Amino acid sequence: MTLVPVAAEKNTKSAVAANKLIVPGFRAAAARAGIKKGQQLDLALITAIRPAAAAGVFTTNRVKAAPVVISRERLRSGRAQALLINSGNANACTGPAGLEAAWESTHWTARYLELPDKLVLPASTGVIGQKLPTERILAALPDLVTRLDPESLSEVAQAIMTTDTFAKTAQVDGYIGNYPITVAGIAKGAGMIHPRMATLLAFILTDAAISPRLLKTYLKAGLGQSFNRISVDGDTSTNDTVIVMASGQTRHQLVDRPDSAAGQAFATLLHQVMADLAVQIVRDGEGAQRCFRVTVEGAVSALEARKAAETVATSPLVKTAITGADANWGRIMAALGRSGARFDPEQVDICFGPHQVVRNGQAVGPAVERAAHELMLTGFFDLTIHLHLGDFSDYYLTCDLTADYVRINAEYRS
Amino acid sequence: MTLVPVAAEKNTKSAVAANKLIVPGFRAAAARAGIKKGQQLDLALITAIRPAAAAGVFTTNRVKAAPVVISRERLRSGRAQALLINSGNANACTGPAGLEAAWESTHWTARYLELPDKLVLPASTGVIGQKLPTERILAALPDLVTRLDPESLSEVAQAIMTTDTFAKTAQVDGYIGNYPITVAGIAKGAGMIHPRMATLLAFILTDAAISPRLLKTYLKAGLGQSFNRISVDGDTSTNDTVIVMASGQTRHQLVDRPDSAAGQAFATLLHQVMADLAVQIVRDGEGAQRCFRVTVEGAVSALEARKAAETVATSPLVKTAITGADANWGRIMAALGRSGARFDPEQVDICFGPHQVVRNGQAVGPAVERAAHELMLTGFFDLTIHLHLGDFSDYYLTCDLTADYVRINAEYRS
């Protein structure tokens, strides 16, 4: 995962318009259904020309939104042909009525598209605990279906935004054998300006021909270098959803073996898109000014490496130090110390980018701390911690904790 | 633990002066040694007339400050006669020089007091990673010893403050048999305006005659209702220290059996002081506007009850909702869902004080949410969650997360 995403520069509204995402075999449309206040895009539909191989991963939160329950169930078949996505309402914590609303919305979508219900997957993001305004979705559906278009994927990226300050899209092209293939994704981040909004959503499309089983394998394998290694505030949502669909439009031979060259080629592209979207989500973390990667090396076990990186990356005191561009290694040591990872404080090294501020658990001096301060002001940097005790390493990508984060999340519903 | 501490009203500077803490058998003094910038109290000494029974509990952080290492070792004897405490420098992460500094400071204190070194316990709070200015401490010691006085304990409470906005003291009186006894404590909170400050310190003194073994038993037993059930930002420090000393000045028979009436009487008073100080620490959490208790009932196990309460109490999204006085139960559900506690979302009840905003996992309605909003504006309230699955309950006391917290902790060293 590179810190500056491939697509970083093009993610302005005008640039997105200029670089339309197109994945052969898929069409999309977005609409203003009135779920959000004001005239904003809040409903989107993505369809495949025929049933596509599909796989998904969902929130591990015990509280799962209705669309998560339904999509997870429907994806057992490994096939899907449409995604119905809304923002402005998470359709979570509303009891049986929530399941009913998700069922009804996808049922009518299926009717208009002339598909079986089970090939339509719902996804929602927004306010938790309020009834989904199904009637508004149903009213918007006929027009939405009519406007399905291969060039409208970027609009879907806009329709699923909540507090995101830019639409998140990523696309890479490659080959399977001699067949050119495309993998493209859109995502919304863990931004929640409205006090009851949450959720990370990501949808990845490809025209490659990949078996559902393999799609799931590669999707899961990519999480450890993308969506499972980012943290904005440590909170997980009721709606987190990542779905990948493969239309098989390129007509190369079906890829079904994980260790095949074709499979590896596809996995590389998929993981690139996943990592790219994940970086964009952190860059756009609520109120974030700086984005940094915490890498822990030399841990005794993989678990301890992950816990140490996670604890440092989510520590409010470390994050606020970064907000102040302060190379505050004392707080990093203290966070390491409560992470559960074994280490000897007097062997720890800490670097901000190339600037080593701690050697053997002690300050190197004010000059390197000033250099680290300057580095932090650039907005992107690496924080590397070496425990010098074992051979395991891991990392988390995170952002600073600013007064804006508090303001955004404290604003009362209006 | 009551939400409004016994001593809440009297903890203004003038009131502290008016209600001097006095514990028979103890003397104290505070000085301006120049460890902190400006002319602030930053060094304190507490002494017992003769060796007192003593017990301590210390940070569980793997990174331990030098005074923690030394005090823990010296307390193995169950005896202590003096506490040497400084603010402005944590004496942590400074390698062997840190141990040397703590050793030297207490050595000279012992010399002036004509005690063996091992009866003097060091404690520090402040900047991590900077060398303790031992020479300033040594220079201040002779005068400090001369000024030891039974009425100066309140000054010690001021000398150990860092970003605390008020000095934290608590005192209760009671009886063991016909002998009147006093238990008094002072503490500093988890406030850290300087980016490298951390640490909770608490010192509790009594004139009761309690065996060291029993003192330790009662101290540990009280943690679960005081210092182990508070959270300001989830970070733990390198210096956390709670020490209790019993002078035995009252001359009643030594209390040595935990289940004796005398023992229980003492434990009640001790726990009252511990809980009182803990509440004051949360009330004075950095930038805190509101203080609330998260109680989880009906959990399947004691561990799950604790984890659920802890996860809700430390969730940035829950805390910022409270900052906005928003009865944002969706975030509470989401935090519960990632806590690891087992529950069925559709059985959960959530109350803000007497106002039930969630019944069976769903919103009760806007009227009670408005009532909860009004309650939150008062600054102290109970947040009670019932999982309706088992018989275990637990709680955490915490505060909201404000823009002031971020500002305080982001300020660059100057």
Image: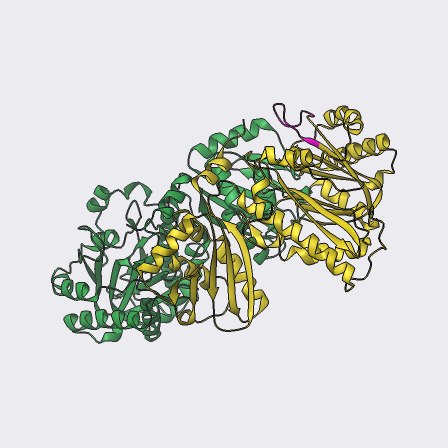
Chain colours: A yellow, B green
Residue farthest along the front direction in this orientation: A178
Quarter of the view holding residue A146: top right
- Residue at 38% in and 63% down: B263
Q: Nearer the viewer, residue A300 or B116?
A: A300
Using residue B248 as the reference point, say whether residue B360 is left or right of it.
Answer: right
Using residue A322 as the reference point, say whether residue B135 is left or right of it.
Answer: left
Does the magenta portion include A40? yes
Q: Position of residue B227 (x, y in %)?
A: 41, 55
- Residue at 31% in and 48% down: B164
Does the magenta portion include B95? no
Quarter of the view holding residue B202: bottom left
Q: Position of residue A95 (x, y in %)?
A: 71, 37
Q: Is residue A115 above or below residue B336?
A: above
Q: Position of residue B393 (x, y in %)?
A: 56, 51
**Which contiguous range is marked in magenta?**
A33-43
Q: Position of residue B294 (x, y in %)?
A: 51, 45
